[in-house]
Image (cartoon, grey):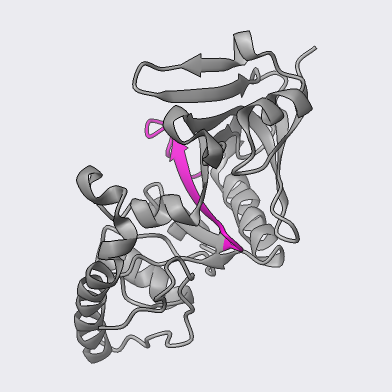
């Protein structure tokens, strides 16, 4: 029988992940010529699973899980499974009223907050919080994250595209996106939802800010790059203050690089 509950730990060796979750390397590892190994398991929609994300006091569960994939770079096997991707239903049912989906997602945000997960903003993104952050997200339509500390109304929920909602806790980062059937968006009728979770370490977060030719030397270029991005942030913030927004100066950036927090 396939496991109904799986435990994942970013950075654990692939073999350890397989053994403790009772998986078979022949059937649960997809080895790609590009040098990546994908350790994976899928559940059926009739019998979804549960994924327990292990992160010390910041651990939490992902219910209604449909699939989990851990990525390993064979040239850096000492790093272990440096990224996990999980897909899950928003509720146990495949079809769910939009307001029920909204309430379930808000409950997830609250669970993460209680477990100590904090919001992450892009370095060029203005430091806004709560309702103001959501207003900016909708009205300005920036290429940025949805606020994690705002409970959307049903009207708000129906206007959200897909997110993402970004968090960090300890040395881990978490992205959550919502996908839904755009042909089933009548507010008083059921819709279809799928959640996507991506978990990765702070090195992967640091490397993600650079093109492939600079990623291996990301620490050398970090300060200059972040200074440039934050100059954009502060320019946007000055414009938003003139529009009546309040900047959340208490926002704490995650520490990724030894020089953090970097300022222009």
Residue 12 seen: yes
Q: Is residue 36 left or right of residue 25?
A: left
Residue 182 shown in magenta: yes
Residue closest to the eye, 66 or 216: 216
Task: Name the spot of residue 121 as percent of width and height, x first.
Answer: 40, 67
Task: Name the spot of residue 106 as percent of width and height, x first.
Answer: 61, 57
Residue that protrudes farthest toward the right in the picture:
1
Give the residue drawn at x 43%, y 84%. 248
Query: What is the quadrant of residue 35 in the picture?
Result: top left
Vertical side of 111 occupied by 98: above or below: above
Query: Magenta residues?
Result: 169-192
Query: Looking at the figure, which quarter contains the C terminus?
Result: bottom left
Task: Name the spot of residue 186 as percent of width and height, x first.
Answer: 44, 40
Residue closest to the eye, 214 or 225: 214
Query: What is the quadrant of residue 260 in the picture?
Result: bottom left
Q: Is residue 176 left or right of residue 68?
A: left
Task: Name the spot of residue 238 as percent of width and height, x first.
Answer: 22, 88
Residue 240 shown in magenta: no
Vertical side of 56 occupied by 191: above or below: above
Query: Looking at the figure, which quarter contains the N terminus?
Result: top right
Residue that protrudes farthest toward the top in the picture:
26
Query: What is the quadrant of residue 18 in the picture?
Result: top right
Residue closest to the eye, 97 or 56: 56
Give the residue drawn at x 42%, y 31%. 75
Give the residue drawn at x 57%, y 60%. 171
User: Total marks drawn?
Assistant: 0
Residue 164 seen: no
């Amino acid at each position: 029988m396939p496991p109904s509950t799986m435990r994942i730990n970013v950075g654990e060796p692939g073999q350890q992940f397989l053994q403790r979750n009772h998986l078979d390397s022949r059937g649960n590892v997809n080895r790609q010529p590009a040098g990546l190994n994908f350790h994976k398991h899928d559940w059926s929609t009739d019998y979804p699973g549960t994924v327990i994300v292990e992160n010390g006091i910041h651990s939490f569960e992902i219910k209604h899980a449909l699939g989990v994939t851990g990525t390993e770079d064979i040239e850096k096997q000492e790093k272990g499974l440096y990224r996990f991707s999980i897909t899950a239903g928003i509720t146990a049912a495949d079809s769910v009223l939009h307001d029920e989906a909204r309430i379930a997602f808000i409950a997830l945000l609250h669970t993460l907050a209680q477990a100590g997960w904090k919001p992450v903003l892009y370095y060029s993104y203005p430091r806004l919080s709560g309702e103001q952050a959501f207003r900016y997200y909708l009205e300005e339509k920036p290429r940025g994250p949805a606020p994690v500390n705002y409970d959307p109304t049903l009207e708000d929920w129906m206007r959200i595209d897909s997110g993402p909602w970004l968090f960090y806790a300890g040395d881990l980062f978490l992205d959550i996106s919502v996908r839904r059937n755009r042909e089933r968006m009548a507010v008083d009728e059921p819709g279809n939802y799928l959640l996507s979770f991506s978990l990765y370490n702070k090195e992967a977060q640091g490397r993600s800010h650079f093109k492939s030719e600079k990623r291996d030397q990301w620490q050398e270029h970090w300060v200059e790059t972040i200074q440039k991005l934050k100059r954009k942030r502060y320019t946007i913030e000055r414009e938003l203050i003139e529009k009546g927004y309040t900047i959340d100066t208490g926002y704490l950036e995650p520490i990724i690089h030894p020089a953090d927090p970097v300022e222009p």
